[in-house]
Amino acid sequence: MSDRRTTPKAGATAAPQAAAPEAPGGAPALPREALEIAAGYAFTGPALDLGALLWDGRCLPDAQIRVPLPMLNRHGLVAGATGTGKTKTLQLIAEQLSAQGVPVFLADVKGDLSGVAAPGQPNDKVRSRAAEVHQQWTATGFPAEFHALGGIGRGIPVRATITSFGPVLLSKVLRLNRTQEQSLGLIFHYADTKGLELVDLKDLRAVVAFLTSDEGKGELKNIGGLSTATAGVILRSLTAFEAQGMADFFGEPEFDTSEFLRTAPDGRGVVSVLELSAVQDRPQLFSTFLMWLLADLFHDLPEVGDADRPKLVFFFDEAHLLFDGASEAFLDAITQTVRLIRSKGVGVFFVTQTPKDVPAEVLGQLGNRVQHALRAFTPDDQKALRATVKTFPNSAYDLEELLTGLGTGEAVVTVLSEKGAPTPVAATRLRAPQSLMGPIEADALERAVTESALHGRYAQAVDRESAYEKLQASRGGKGPDEVRGGKGPDELRGGKGPDEIREAAGAGAGAGESRARHQEQPSVVEQVVGSGMFKSLARSIGTQIGREITRSVFGTARRRR
């Protein structure tokens, strides 16, 4: 009896199996419709093997479903209901990318992707799946590095400075409205032009407190000003943010995202696993932090055009969290980043439950699709199912029926061919990962972290002199809340006022002239705490005193490496 999940839809007739001719070697030839689908995946160049075609209730191992390696920087979507096998699909793709020398970044929300570093365990299910899809399965572990946001959880700490994170992403984390976001941007602009490095949360609080003090409130008068009410909202948001234990995410040493682009000595790509299970109750933070990592890569990497393989493939798990509550400007920035980062050799795969979780402008940039089963238990589910079907090219399958009947480890696939055209929609029984399908032992994970070459570089947090200390020194050693009676940064800079800010923003002298003038004048650091601070400044995130930081579309600071 045929399985209706993979039968052709009305009007598309499968060839009778009894009449199918035999291929060389005695194997039955593929039905005509299946043969047409399989022909769309017969690539000549390097490709990743996803699995075997499902047609008319049968798995056809001679029809292999693949994705061309050069097309993986055209981005993708891995979607499906909980428990349908999305995580194993990520693992399968990551393994094959690593084997072909491509580094991979995986966001591990549930804590079960660390097994990519260890050989898998053969069992009856694995052997059965490998036989069904003609997979030569060998237990294999892959080179991996483990990271944790702010060191919360097991992994090499990943931190960002406030300056680098920028006002746009920070506003989303703090849940500020548009007006408050614009005011925060003005605060960052002031700090950038005055050489006040915002390394951690106390630095930002100190700058906000100064700009609302009697001494500092005139600093922004001619470029919009900062209302006391808005400053109060920002300060309260920062205080609540820190009270929730989130201060550890910001500080130094800041993580260098180029670490994700490494290969192992044997030529395989390193799989960087960011453990998020310890912070999964803070979705606004970790999803926005993932966007910072991507934005940092975006404005640091050079253009490479159409390469024969990606420099990195970045899997963005729980992608719907990034878009929840996002402003129009924020969504525009995401769309622009996804559209342009392709030419820098980075592929981005969004991982979520349904395509409707991803805005249409972003979804339109995703050329490769692996859609696992969907549920249709409620009217909303049924609406989402119909919307998902409409996002696929024309298909010989009845996709509404197919998508609700797929088993675990099965998916509907369409990718971009070597010529950049969409391949036919193919129901696919996916291969089994060769690494461990589950987390590795805690002691093995701890050992992998401490023995990493990155551990000594990032494990220990440092707190060098930055905006907090400079403003404290400018007030004669008073604390950040004791803002009366001390000189502001402009007084210490020889009486320069808000006009400097306008000049740095491009109103007045040209950018080159403005930079030259700032370089000739003594810096805030040299006048406030002495020239001995210069060596510490050289270790900063790239801020140069008296020179405004160049920021990307997300407001993140460009790093000077």
Image: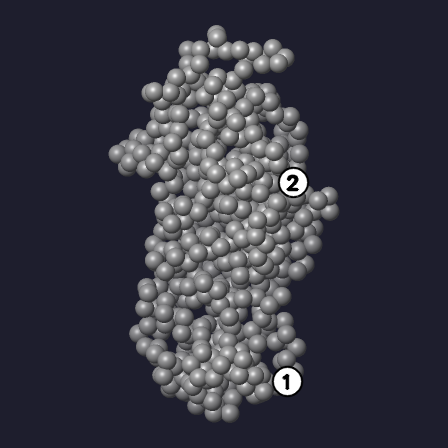
At label 1, counting other C-alpha atoms closer than 10 Å, the crowd grade (few under 14, some 14-19, many 20 or more) is some
Q: Helix, strand or loop at disc 1?
A: helix
Outermost residue on the front side: it is 419
Find residue 245 and report its horizontal and vertical position in percent: 47, 59
Find residue 437 and report its horizontal and vertical position in percent: 57, 34
Task: Give the residue at x 46% y 52%.
Answer: 339
State left or right for residue 337 relative to residue 119: left
Outermost residue on the top side: it is 18
State left or right for residue 234 relative to residue 126: left
Instruction: Inspect this view and state whether residue 144 appears.
Output: no
Task: Give the residue at x 41% y 87%.
Answer: 215
Above or below, comparing residue 478 to residue 109 in the picture:
below
State left or right for residue 372 relative to residue 252: left
Outermost residue on the left side: it is 379
> Where's the N terminus, which quadrant?
top left
Q: Helix, strand or loop at disc 2?
A: loop
Q: Which residue is mark 1?
A: 531
Asked whether disc 2 touches disc 1, contact meaning CB atoms under 8 Å apart, the reply is: no
Task: Give the residue at x 57% y 61%.
Answer: 300
At label 2, counting other C-alpha atoms closer than 10 Å, the crowd grade (few under 14, some 14-19, many 20 or more) is some
Q: Which residue is mark 2?
A: 100
> Where's the C terminus, which quadrant?
bottom right
